[in-house]
Amino acid sequence: MKLSLLLMATLSLFSCSSQNLNDYDGMAPEFDVKTFFAGQLQAKGVVLDRSGTVTRRFSVEMIGSWQGNRGTLAEWFVFDDGEKTERTWIITKLPGGRYTGTAGDIAGIAQGESAGFALHWDYQLNLVVDDSEYLVTFDDWLYQLDQQTVINRSYIKKWGMQVGEVILVISK
């Protein structure tokens, strides 16, 4: 009896489904990355630990520009503790709503794809915490609400387990 209960509990954990990009296919507004991430943008966000507690707050100034299907997105972060960092993405738009991206603290190449109002990115980031550096995976979801606003929710994972989350609102 205990074994069957354990088996049922285990199966229910693994049967939980996560969101799928195709769930957003055809839903408006169509996320046009080149249009949204062009010009000046601002963002405000929070970093949460694995229990969901806010550990940091931050703001970001961004400037995006595109030449053909290649874009640059420069980001300047200011955290509530005074830390300042920057990142510059080089993004390439590919056929079929797909994207690739690189940046100085990104390990390898970020892979992205859009459908409807959503954009999904997967990448590994070299995250510096105090005097240590950790290679973490970002499961990054962006949702365009309207022509002026995108909500970004990033799940931070280490060894396949969620260790944190970032939520931010990006405004044109």
Image (cartoon, grey):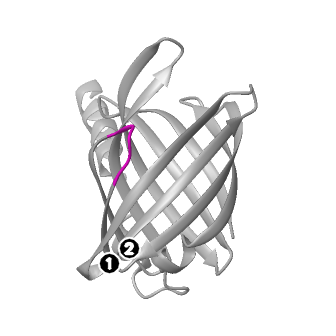
First in residue order: circle 2 vs circle 1: 1
Q: From this viewpoint, which residue is outermost toward the top? A: 131
Residue that mark 2 sits on? 114
- Rounded to the nearest angstrom, the CA distance separating label 2 from label 1 is 5 Å
For image coordinates 44% across by 14% down, the residue present is 132
> Where residue 52 is drawn, which disc sits there?
none
Q: Locate residue 87, reporting x and y percent.
A: 50, 44
Residue 13 drawn above or below residue 111: above
Which region of the structure is painted magenta? 102-106
For disc 1, the neighbor class at 10 Å (few under 14, some 14 to 19, many from 20) is some
Q: Residue at x 40, y 49 (%)?
A: 139
Coordinates of residue 105 in the picture (x, y in percent): 39, 37
Check disc 2 and report its element: helix, strand or loop: strand
Q: Are marks 2 and 1 in contact (CB under 8 Å)?
A: yes
Label 2 is placed on what type of residue?
Ser
Say which element carries label 1.
Answer: helix
Please state if 51 lies on the left or on the right of 106 as rendered: right
Front-most of residues 123 and 78 = 78
**Residue 153: image location, x then y, percent:** 54, 53
Please give the residue where the numbered disc 1 appears in the rendered image.
Answer: 97
Hey, what amino acid is under mark 1? Gly
